[in-house]
Every structure is written in structure tokens, then in C-alpha cells.
Image (cartoon, rainbow, N blue to C red):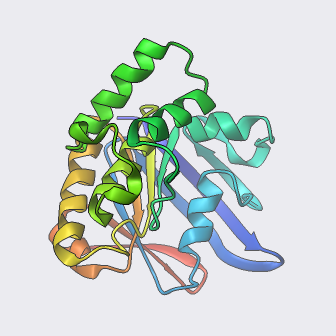
Amino acid sequence: MEKVIQIENGRILQGEKTIIDQLNFTVNSNDFIYLIGKTGSGKSSLLKCLYGEVPLFEGKGQVAGYDLQNLTAKDIPFLRRKIGIVFQDFQLLYDRTVAENLLFVMGATGWKDKAMMQKRAKEVLQLVGLETKMNAMPHTLSGGEQQRISIARAIINHPQLLLADEPTGNLDPETSAEIMHLMVAIAKEEKTAVIMATHDMNMVEQFSGRILKVEKERLIELTK
């Protein structure tokens, strides 16, 4: 079991305003973590800090082997290859097929071998239960299927860390439960740590995992 994230005495700013202070937390490779807190409390800022979009203003921090304090513009694309990101609004390319969406990401992150790319695309689509949809256009798929594709895209590079920002926010309860089962299964199958920002407390109660809450500029761990 390895440490995927370790932050000590961290501080995250937005502009000049402190969003999270005295940030101390560790995430191991087998952790499934729920990140909760009111809208505007700083959940998204924390996720952005982890993938290099918002700097760690103070403190020490490392994510997937990268030092957040000394992160350069050149490092960020390489850090992001070790992190998969799932968005609430899917962010698929709607002018390309499902397979082309996946191949585009692989091409952009340094894959060269076409046969290996096709093989990995097929693998991740099997993992999310959509291997028959390789040639479908995203707009022909349901919301739940589109989110499955976006999860497949997020795990394409065998990331050490999967960040999900309200991944069930646009889905009905039944589809949300399916997506949660899938994310839990993928975390185990791919040995990927998961941090999922959510407002859906039903999910938090239903599925096991650590709970971290952003409240009053602090990150605190809750017990179930």
C-alpha cells in the first residue's frame, strides 16, 4: 500500500482569500474517499490543487510522486497522466465516436502504438460495461452511459488517483447507484485511490469509504 497523496500544513488560496488552511491529509492507494461540504466550501479548489490547477500556497504536499510546492508548468501534464478526472457534465467530445474520445486522450498523453491503444480502449470499455458502444456517438447515449464513458476515459492511463467532482450530480438515483457500484469496482480492479466530491449523502451512507468534510476553512475527517 503506497501513499498517493500526503499534504502537511497546507494552505490553499483563491485570489487572496484563504479557502482551506492547516490542511493535513494522507491518501493511500486503496482508499475510497468522499469529499463533502457546502457549495463554495472549497471542495473543487482542493481537487484543483491536487491536479495542479490551483497552487499549494503553503506547506508540503506530494501527489502521485510530484511535489506540489515545486510543480512547474512542464510537470503538470505528467502529473495529470497519473490522475483520472471525472466531471459532473461528462465533458466528452460530441463530434467523435466513443472509441475516438478514448483514442484522442491516449494520443494527447503520449501513446504511439495504435494496436496497444485499441486494446486499452476495448479493455476500459469492457470494465465499464459498454464494449458494444465503441462506434456510438456520445449524444446517442443516456446520461448514465455518458458518465461510464467519462470514467473509462479517466482510467485509460492506469492512474494512481481518480478524482470525481459530483459524478452523479446530473443522474437519477437508480443510475447514480449504478455509477457508484462501478466506481467502487474500478477502484479495486485498477488499484486506484478515489476522491469523490459529492452532495449525495445517501451514497455516502450506502457505500463504504472515508469521509472528509470541508468546513470553515478546514478539512476534517468524519467517522461513519
The image quadrant where one finds the N terminus is top left
Residue 128, located in which quarter of the rendered image? top left
Residue 224 visible in the displayed image: no
Please state the horizontal and vertical placement of residue 110, each as a whole percent of the image.
Answer: 61, 24
In this rendering, is residue 221 above or below 156?
A: below
Is 107 located above or below residue 48 in the figure?
Answer: above
Q: Residue at x 28, y 56 (%)?
A: 145
The quarter of the displayed image where residue 41 is located? bottom right
Image quadrant in which the C terminus is located:
bottom left
Residue drawn at x 77%, y 62% is 57
Tell me if I can see residue 217 in this picture.
yes
Question: Can you tell which quarter of the image residue 211 is in?
Answer: bottom left
- In this picture, is 87 found above or below 160? below
Q: How many marks?
A: 0
Report whether 161 appears left or right of 56.
left
Q: Position of residue 97 (x, y in %)?
A: 43, 42
Q: Is residue 163 left or right of residue 149?
A: right
The structure residue drawn at horizontal position 48% and vertical position 15%, both measured from the top left corner, is: 114
Q: How far from the left and from the top, in percent, is residue 167? A: 38, 65
Question: For this view, does 10 lie left or right of residue 162?
Answer: right
* Left or right placement of residue 7 versus residue 87 in this view: right
Residue 215 position in % (x across, y down) = 51, 84
**Which one is nearer the viewer's eye here, 194 or 99?**
99
